[in-house]
Image (cartoon, rainbow, N blue to C red):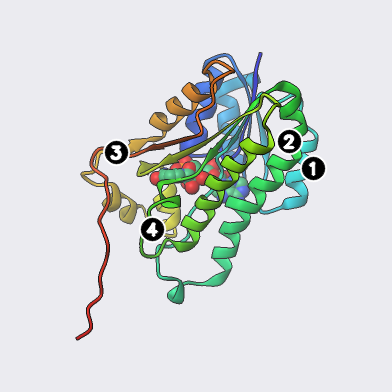
């Protein structure tokens, strides 16, 4: 039985991945901060799901957790979020630092600590980046910066892992309707509903299916980067300010 370690299984993409992989006969070890949701998922998925309460900002605990794991065949670096989409000169600093600690520092600490384990199993790493890594938008510089880090980290890691048999992939979605935009707007469900309204956005299940496909390809095949969007999302072109 193969084992996946998935961060952020208490909602959205991570939760859909936990269900899909357990349903496909994998053992899943899943993390998140909300213990009641971890417990609920455990009740639903049973013995092949092991919940671990873990805040990705707590670097010592991230390292300790990764050191204690059994053989891991697949690491899905999914936990992450975006702070409010406001220009940096209007934004508060502390939430931005917390986001960087989660999306980048926690991810690096976890991956670094788990690498000997993953090299031992000739496993795979799937990182959740975003279209924000490539296409800038107003109010997104720090979130985009974290996801650009994840993109480049993933490509560089492929070079480091050359010859080990470990596969590394960056998944880069556009709009996926999860709790992402509720979190981004400080818990405002109506703002999230308005954002996704009429778009037919991608679902967490769409991304989980893609991740599962990548993870179950033949071991000689590496998907480097996979970018995906809903059909109704594309790009807006350059914004130009004209003086009076
Ligand atoms: N939704 C999109 O449109 C979209 C697009 C591109 C990329 N992504 C990326 O996809 C990943 C998953 O997002 P999602 O859309 O599924 O969002 P979501 O529904 O809000 O789920 C986010 C998950 O990350 C966990 N998490 C957040 N901060 C954490 C922390 N400090 N420590 C531990 N766990 C933490 C949350 O768990 P707890 O709150 O319980 O800790 C939750 O399980 C993220 O990396 C996101 O940036 C999303």
Residue located beneath label 2 in the image: 114
Mark 3 C-beta closer than 8 Å to ligand 1: no
Q: What is the C-alpha distance between the residues marked 1 and 3?
A: 38 Å
- Of the image marks 3 and 4, the number of the one nearer the N terminus: 4
- Say which quarter of the image contains residue 77: top right
For mark 1, give the secondary structure.
helix
Residue located beneath label 1 in the image: 64
Task: Locate residue 182 relative to residue 55 in the image: left or right.
Answer: left
Q: Nearer the viewer, mark 3 or mark 4?
A: 4
Residue located beneath label 4 in the image: 136
Q: What is the C-alpha distance between the residues marked 4 and 1?
A: 36 Å
* Residue 55 in view here: no
The answer to the question of whether label 1 and label 3 lie on touching residues, with beta carbons closer than 8 A, is: no
Q: Which of marks 2 and 4 is in front?
A: 4
Task: Locate residue 12 relative to residue 167 in the image: left or right.
Answer: left
Q: Check the image and report above or below for 219 versus 94.
A: above
Q: Check the image and report above or below for 28 versus 62.
A: above
Q: Which of marks 1 and 3 is in front?
A: 3
Q: Position of residue 14 (x, y in %)?
A: 52, 35
For mark 2, give the secondary structure.
helix
Residue located beneath label 3 in the image: 230
- Of the image marks 1 and 3, the number of the one nearer the N terminus: 1
- Of the image marks 2 and 4, the number of the one nearer the N terminus: 2
**Badge 1: few (under 14), some or many (20 or more) residues near its Cα, within 10 Å?**
few
For mark 4, give the secondary structure.
loop
Q: What is the C-alpha distance between the residues marked 3 and 4?
A: 18 Å
For mark 3, give the secondary structure.
loop
């Amino acid at each position: 039985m193969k084992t996946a370690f998935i961060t952020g299984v208490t909602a959205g993409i991570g939760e859909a991945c936990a269900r899909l992989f357990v349903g496909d006969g994998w053992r899943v070890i899943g993390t998140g901060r909300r213990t009641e949701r971890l417990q609920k998922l455990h009740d639903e998925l049973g013995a092949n799901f092991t919940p671990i309460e873990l805040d990705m900002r707590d670097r010592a605990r991230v390292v300790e957790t990764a050191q204690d794991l059994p053989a891991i065949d697949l690491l899905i670096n999914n936990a992450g979020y975006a702070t409010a989409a406001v220009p940096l000169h209007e934004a508060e600093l502390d939430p931005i630092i917390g986001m960087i600690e989660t999306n980048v520092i926690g991810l690096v600490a976890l991956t670094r600590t788990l690498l000997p384990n993953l090299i031992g199993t000739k496993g795979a790493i799937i990182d959740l980046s975003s279209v924000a890594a490539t296409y800038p938008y107003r109010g997104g510089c720090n979130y985009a910066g974290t996801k650009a880090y994840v993109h480049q980290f993933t490509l560089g890691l492929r070079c480091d892992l050359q010859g080990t048999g470990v596969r590394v992939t960056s998944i880069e979605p556009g709009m996926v309707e999860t709790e992402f935009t509720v979190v981004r707007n400080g818990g405002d469900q109506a703002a999230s509903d308005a954002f996704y309204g009429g778009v037919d956005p991608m679902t967490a299940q769409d991304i989980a299916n893609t991740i599962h496909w990548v993870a179950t390809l033949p071991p000689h095949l590496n998907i480097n980067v996979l970018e995906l969007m809903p059909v109704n999302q594309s790009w807006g072109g350059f914004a130009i300010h004209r003086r009076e």
